[in-house]
Amino acid sequence: MLTRLEQAQKAWGGSHDAIDNWLNERQDVLVSYCKLAGLPPYTADKQTLPEVDNIKQFCQLLVDYISAGHFEVYDRIVSQCEINGGKHKLLAEEQQARLTETTQAALEFNDLYAESTESDDLDGFDQNMAALGNALEVRFELEDQLIATLFESASNKAETA
């Protein structure tokens, strides 16, 4: 996932402030996820669960990231694709619809753990983190496809102008 983020930042970074901010938020989510999961380069004692406060901070980052995508970025991309060309708008709308499935997984994780007060409230945490990781991987791929659709539609419009 981190490699995909680096590729996205390299390909589209600096092209638009909203996309830059969004990719930076994605990086924050990924780093926090890796820390909670004890993934390299962050190691954790596999026998203990993360601190509840760290989980709450992650949930807040996750919800902020999901919200930015849905309420700031996706609609702008679809609208721009509509301006640039009809087929790209349909593709962007399809990708946006598929993102909704991953949103549900993230919100379910948030609902389970954002209000946890003790480590006793963390039943199934490892399995839920793994499921969330899979959903995030799909989400990031779809988001990258959505951004690529935007740039392809803009490129096609520039070529026909």
Image: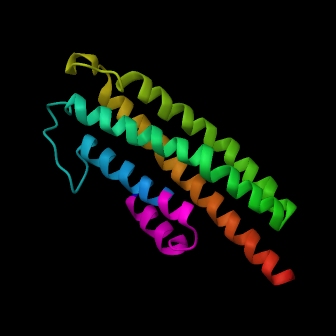
Q: Is residue 83 above or below residue 158?
A: above
Q: Is residue 161 above or below residue 108?
A: below
Q: Is 37 in the magenta?
A: no
The quarter holding residue 76 reads bottom right
The percent position of residue 111, horizontal first and vertical second, equals 43, 23
**Quadrant (top left, top right, bottom left, bottom right) of the N terminus:** bottom left
The percent position of residue 118, horizontal first and vertical second, equals 21, 19
Residue drawn at point x = 16 percent, y = 37 percent: 46
The quarter holding residue 127 reads top left
Q: Is 124 situated left or right of 159 in this image?
A: left
Q: Is 12 in the magenta?
A: yes
Residue drawn at point x = 60 percent, y = 53 percent: 142
Nearer to me, 109 or 3: 109
Q: Is residue 159 above or below residue 39?
A: below
The number of numbered discs placed on residues in the rendered structure image is: 0
Q: Which colour style is shown?
A: rainbow
Q: Is 1 situated left or right of 117 in this image?
A: right
Nearer to me, 61 or 109: 61
The quarter holding residue 50 reads top left
Residue drawn at point x = 65 percent, y = 58 percent: 146
The percent position of residue 67, horizontal first and vertical second, equals 54, 41
Task: Pick out the residue farthest to the top.
Answer: 120
Residues shaded magenta: 2-21
